[in-house]
Amino acid sequence: MEIEKKKTNQESSNDQFSLRNNHRFCPTQNKFQIIFVVGTARSGKSLLSQILGSINNVEYIDEPWMIESVSIMQGLNMAKKQVLANMLKAYTKEMFEEMILLRRGNFKPGEKSTVWDKKEPKKIFERLINVRTRTDVKDYIEKEKSVLLINLGHIIPFIPFLKEVFPECKIIHIIRNGFDVAKHIAKKQWFTINALKQPDNNYCLYRTYATTNSENYQVPWWVREGEEEKFIYLNDFAKGLYYWIREYEISETEINHFKCENSSDYMEIKFEDLIESPTEIVEKVTEFTNLKLTQRAYFMISRLNSICPQIKEGDLKLPQEEVGEDMSQKAKRILIKQGY
């Protein structure tokens, strides 16, 4: 999604979102529990979310594009805050109801997002047969005490907006060593020169011009103004580290304030602790979220235990020499602040 970098509040004030006959869009209140799992890319959000998503009364959605985009749009003042908040409420409610109806379920065996890993076959077939209407959905949510779990990336600076829209939500923030994050982002090749020339995803980008080769590129919204060309020509590992640093810099003040104001609804965990002691960490998370671990969830934890050695071994060698001393020192200072 390409955006304008310098859209002002005055321009945003003209944006409208309404229904037929000019009635303002005012969705009904969401009456269900929401848990957000947030963090930078490659921070381990999906590992934790897949375990929690296997709990019977949890409906898990992985990185919904609309919620991420609306959160970023609000942070960049691209439309009226209340309009975006109302859109977010309505979309989330609709998405949750479709999950209960299994209209969004992935029934392909073997895929990471398959519903067969998340729910018992008996429960799946019961819902396919018995849950047909919106009234059925409402009754099912009340009976099962259904919870919506949403895994989100790239929105750490906008956590306060999520809490404002969903006051009763719980937020789990996963932190990971930035050098590890950078290495895995480099492997994904998300920010290569060619990827910035011709993006193949709908990430929030803005167009910039490189004087070095007189070509246009599209860079992520979090690139600091005036550093666009510098970012374009960093190596892939350095771009990943730059991303991790910028997400921290943009969100540091907001998150520190948010933690103080919402200590009962906000939890930070380290990826490394999750890998080292998955059962202990997941049990702490479920206690925080008032969820009950099931046999299926413990099976998912056992699978995580089996891959932990490979994850740890894979992060032993990091190409820190591929970044400049200034960026490396900046990342190390952040790690100290995060308790590493």
Image (cartoon, rainbow, N blue to C red):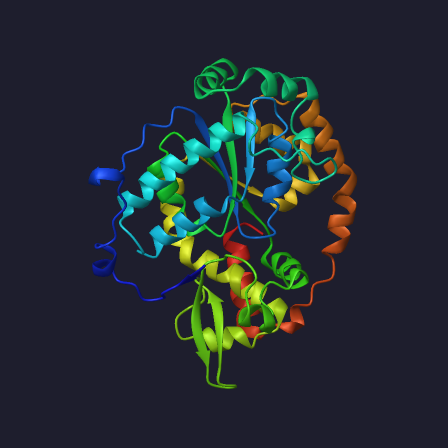
Which quarter of the figure is the N terminus placed in?
Answer: bottom left
Provide residue 77's location: percent of width, then percent of height.
30, 55
Q: Is 294 placed left or right of 32 in the picture?
A: right
Q: On screen, 213 above or below 10?
A: below
Q: Is 254 placed left or right of 306 in the picture?
A: left
For image coordinates 28% across by 44% down, the residue present is 83
Tell me the quarter of the picture where residue 8 sits: bottom left
Provide residue 312's location: percent of width, then percent of height.
74, 50
Question: Does residue 136 appear anywhere in the picture?
Answer: yes
Provide residue 339's location: percent of width, then percent of height.
54, 49
For image coordinates 74% across by 38% down, the residue present is 110
Front in this rendered view, residue 132 or 297: 132
Tell me the quarter of the picture where residue 332 sits: bottom right
For image coordinates 35% across by 41% down, the residue present is 87
Q: On screen, 298 above or below 173?
A: above
For image coordinates 40% across by 75% down, the residue present is 226
